[in-house]
Amino acid sequence: AINLVWLALKVSFVVYEGFTRPVFAWDSWVNWSAGAKAFYFDRGLMLRASGEEFFGGVYRPFLGHPVHFPLLQVWSAGWLNGFNEAYVKAWSAFYYISLLGVTFTAVRREAGGFYALVAAFALSAAPLPVFHAIDAYSDMLLGYYSLCAAIFLFRYGDGGKRTSLTLCSGFIALGLLTKNEGIIFAAAAVFALLLHVLINKKGLRDAALGFLPAIVILTLPWFAFKSYYSFGFGHTGGSLNWLSDPKYGQGAGTIHWEVLVPALREFFLRANFGLIFPFWLFV
């Protein structure tokens, strides 16, 4: 009963915040929503522009970021007949609810209703998904697509038909069109599938026919577009220099190992991740 009340309160909070609070996080606005707003008022992808405005360059500092969520906001603004900064990103709330629902149904199928409820409760208790659910973060979409892909991959490995593998690859493709980090999940799925084929001596051809077509059909245009214009994969790498000092100050190029302890402390113990790590240890 406590778990059900908790879930109801969390979902109510997320829906209310999702529909009333406009975009508020800096990286959410810069990476996803500013470009969406530019596309909406331009009535296109700004491909006819030249120089720094091409493909929304003034509003999108990382042109290599996929545009699934920005285009979802553009589509929403289209049928809203205006770019309402609360409503266009309200999709995040629905993805959050879907994430909990998929978690519940997947765990219930394997372990029963009680453990399914506990799993959904633990996921809902993590502050980071809630934070992403009330703002325009592509991480929420990527998390949903990747979880669905993992579930269908598991079902295929558990004796499922090729249809499960096709659905898995479809969700992986959506992840690739959502955020560059989708490549990591795609690589993990390929590795797991190859391992399954080798261990169980299943046909590699059958696995490839189930897995590759959806990914190729859905993502090839985007990656061809990125390659043609040399967009790369998003960030320039400046944000990854927390461990080394390659350009500035004395001792340039050295590695600062003393950063590791506070970095790990922030990563595992701060409020952003909440109960998720203790829950993983418990599982």
Image: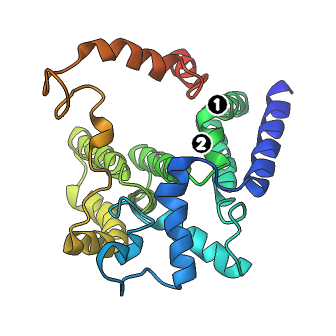
Question: 4 or 177: which is nearer to us?
Answer: 177
Give the crowd class for mark 1: few <14, some 14-19, many >=20 residues within 10 Å: many
Kindly identify which residue carries mark 1: 119
Q: Quadrant of the N terminus?
A: top right
**Residue at 28% over, 47% down:** 187
Q: Position of residue 234 (x, y in %)?
A: 32, 55
Q: Position of residue 265 (x, y in %)?
A: 45, 15
Q: Helix, strand or loop at disc 2?
A: helix
Toward which corner of the image does residue 136 lie, by quadrant?
A: bottom right
131 relative to 137 in the view: left or right: right
Q: Helix, strand or loop at disc 1?
A: helix
Examine the rendered structure and indicate whether residue 274 appears above or below residue 217.
above
**Residue at 40% over, 14% down:** 262
Kindly identify which residue carries mark 2: 106
**Residue at 29% over, 12% down:** 258
Q: What is the tally of numbered marks visible in this picture? A: 2
The kind of residue tagged 1 is: Ala
The kind of residue tagged 2 is: Ala
25 relative to 199 in the view: left or right: right
118 relative to 71 in the view: left or right: right
Toward which corner of the image does residue 45 lie, by quadrant?
A: bottom left
Q: Position of residue 91 (x, y in %)?
A: 66, 60
Q: Quadrant of the C terminus?
A: top right
Examine the rendered structure and indicate whether residue 233 appears above or below residue 199.
below
Give the crowd class for mark 2: few <14, some 14-19, many >=20 residues within 10 Å: some
Examine the rendered structure and indicate whether residue 277 appears above or below residue 158.
above
Q: Position of residue 245 (x, y in %)?
A: 21, 28
Question: 280 or 135: which is nearer to us?
Answer: 135
Toward which corner of the image does residue 272 lie, by quadrant?
A: top right
Q: Nearer the viewer, mark 2 or mark 1?
A: 1
Examine the rendered structure and indicate whether residue 225 appears above or below residue 185.
below
Q: CA distance from mark 2 to mark 1?
A: 10 Å
